[in-house]
Image (cartoon, grey):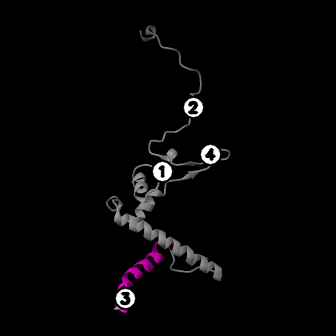
Amino acid sequence: MEAYCTYGLRDEQEKYFQQMKSQMVADRQRNWSGEGKTGRLFMLFISLILSSWVRHIWNSTRLYDLFSSSLEILDEMRPIRLIEHSNRAKMITPFVGKQVDICEEFGFDIPEECAPAYTSKQKPKPKRGRPPKPRVERDFY
């Protein structure tokens, strides 16, 4: 029975090996040292854990109705950027649309400065040139 149960996991294991070969590009080991191979395998293991977690959340929540695959979830979050300027604070682009739903399902807190209701703190720039003359009724004749 133990051998039969182990054999029953074969399909699931093959699915993960196929995922590693396709999505994580681990079909070839391009390493020149033992330490490099060990590090690459460790990173592959960590990425497999994270990918499995994303897939589990996608399957078990309402994200399954919003996205056709777990990869679409990652594609939706890809445009979020951390912008750093010299001598200024760091800024993260605002979360919009389905990104907010993804954060809710994963239990992530959206930073206040990235919330959907966020408005820019930048002051509007004044228009260049001479200001217009005030309009009075006699100008409309």
Q: Which of the two labelled residues, at mark 4 and mark 3, occupies the earlier sequence position?
A: 3
Q: Quadrant of residue 117?
A: top left
The mark nearer the N terminus, 2 or 1, is 1
Q: Position of residue 81 (x, y in %)?
A: 54, 53
> Which numbered circle lies on residue 110?
1
Q: Is residue 32 visible?
A: no
- Circle 4 sits on which residue? 89
Residue, disc 3: 7
- Which quarter of the figure is the N terminus placed in? bottom left
Task: Name the amino acid, label 2.
Answer: Lys
Horizontal side of 75 relative to 129 (left or right) equals left
Q: Residue furthest left?
A: 65
Q: Magenta segment, which residues?
A: 3-24
Q: Is residue 21 magenta?
A: yes
Quarter that holds the C terminus? top left
Residue at horizontal 56 percent and vertical 33 percent from the top: 123
Q: Is residue 36 left or right of residue 137?
A: right
Mark 2 or mark 1, which is nearer to you? 1
Judged from the image, the secondary structure of the residue bearing numbered disc 1 is loop
Q: Main secondary structure of the magenta part?
A: helix
**In front: 6, or 66?**
6
Tell me which numbered mark, 2 or 3, is placed earlier along the sequence.
3
In magenta segment, residue 138: no
Q: What element does badge 3 sit on?
A: helix
